[in-house]
Image (cartoon, grey):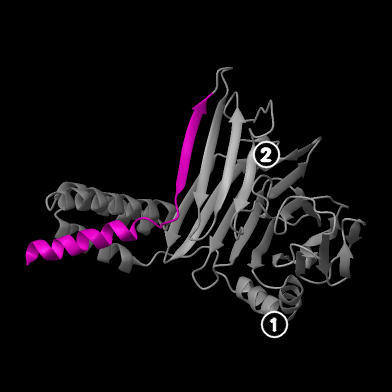
Amino acid sequence: MKKLAIFALTAAVIGLSAVEPHVDLKEIKLKDGRTTYDRMVYFNDGHLILKHTTADGVKTLSKKWGEIFFGFRFGQLPRTNGGWSIWDFFRCYEYNGKVSNLVRDFVPRQVTANSINGIAVIDMEFPSLKGGTLKIRMMQFPSHPTWVFMRVTAKDFNIWRLDFQAYPYQSDLPKDRERHFRSEKGDFNVNKEKVSYTPEGSYLALYNKFVQDTASNFLIIQPEKIKTVEVPKCGAGVEIRLYTNKGVQQFDFAVGYQNNHPASDAVNRFFGENGDAIRKFMEGIDWNPKLSTANFDKSYAEAQKLGVAADKLAAVKKAYDEAMKKGDTTAAANAEKELDKLKKEKAASGLSDFM
């Protein structure tokens, strides 16, 4: 009976460990001496595509298309490459003697992905032009799987402009499709005209008319922090450019989508109660969630039942306790991941005994 109980626990451990937010990093040495850092950063649903090619490990050096990406595969319809851009989803510009898109021009100092009480928490850090630091935190809650909430923080520098890019439904160019942008100022065909205005409302939507009209992309902003919203006349990709007010160091966004539903109806609902509900949720977010010890305690007990070596368990628990004492959620989450890894390794060896 004891063996059967451990077998069931083993199977459960292997199943649970497969969906956790994590970072897959490939370090590729190129023949010309440069290095490409290729990352897939996984949420509970969707993932970032980060690629940075560099000669010195600090600044990027691109010689052809495809060597630098900041993409987001989120809510993409099957067999399409549309939705939020999988190549150039987000840009953060500093203007300090020159203009620099920090997330493209610099290699990230840090990229982590953790699960904190079921919330996917992604953290990125980039240098600025002259000694500052750009921090990006993205969070996805189990209660809102079609939304990701994003906080952008500038430390010791000023953000000049923030861009988001999408290809609603698909990136091709059918002649009968119209790309539309909607805000509190109205609904615009951005295949034909540029849009520029001072925002008063929080809601921005992208969608299509006539064909490819069952997908939409949504963005919620804090209008009091934005001087100008600009959407250039476009072909395939739609850019939302947000010129910031001076002195603002922190910006919050909600990034969402809806698929397989008439876009006109989805957009109307977004500008009504749906958008209001998401904005209210965003305003109530604790951007620095504290880990509950319940998951670690349960996992630790499972590891003991599986027979994970006592010295390895003691080392993980020590690291976890020290992280919790310091309030370091990233280190605590990493300790939880190490515990899960030990469980998975032990579980795999336990399953082999039944083969």
Q: Give the mark toward the camera: 2 or 1.
A: 1
Q: Position of residue 155 (x, y in %)?
A: 65, 48
**Going 36% across and 58% down the picture, which residue do you hit?**
325
Which of the two residues, 300 or 37, is positioned nearer the viewer here? 37
Q: Earlier in the sequence, mark 2 or mark 1?
A: 2
- Inspect the image, locate mark 2, and give the three-letter code of the amino acid beneath it: Arg
Q: Which residue is mark 1?
A: 273
Q: Is residue 355 left or right of residue 228?
A: left
**Going 55% across and 18% down the picture, which residue do you hit?**
31
Q: Position of residue 354 (x, y in %)?
A: 12, 53
User: Residue 355, relative to residue 290: is it above or below?
Assistant: above
- Inspect the image, locate mark 1, and give the three-letter code of the amino acid beneath it: Glu
* Local SS, label 2: helix
Q: Is residue 322 visible?
A: no
Which of the two residues, 191 or 315, is positioned nearer the viewer here? 191
CA–CA distance in space, label 2 to label 1: 36 Å
User: Residue 335, relative to residue 295: is it above or below?
Assistant: above
Does the magenta segment cover residue 9? Answer: yes
Number of marks? 2
User: Residue 3, relative to residue 73: is it above or below?
Assistant: below
**Going 88% across and 55% down the picture, which residue do you hit?**
191
Q: Quadrant of residue 246?
A: bottom right
Graded by Cα atoms within 10 Å as few (under 14), some (14 to 19) or many (20 or more), the crowding at tag 1 reads few
User: Residue 66, relative to residue 332: is it above or below?
Assistant: above
Which of the two residues, 108 or 320, is positioned nearer the viewer here? 108
* Local SS, label 1: helix
Q: Which mark is residue 104?
A: 2
Q: Which residues are magenta?
A: 1-29
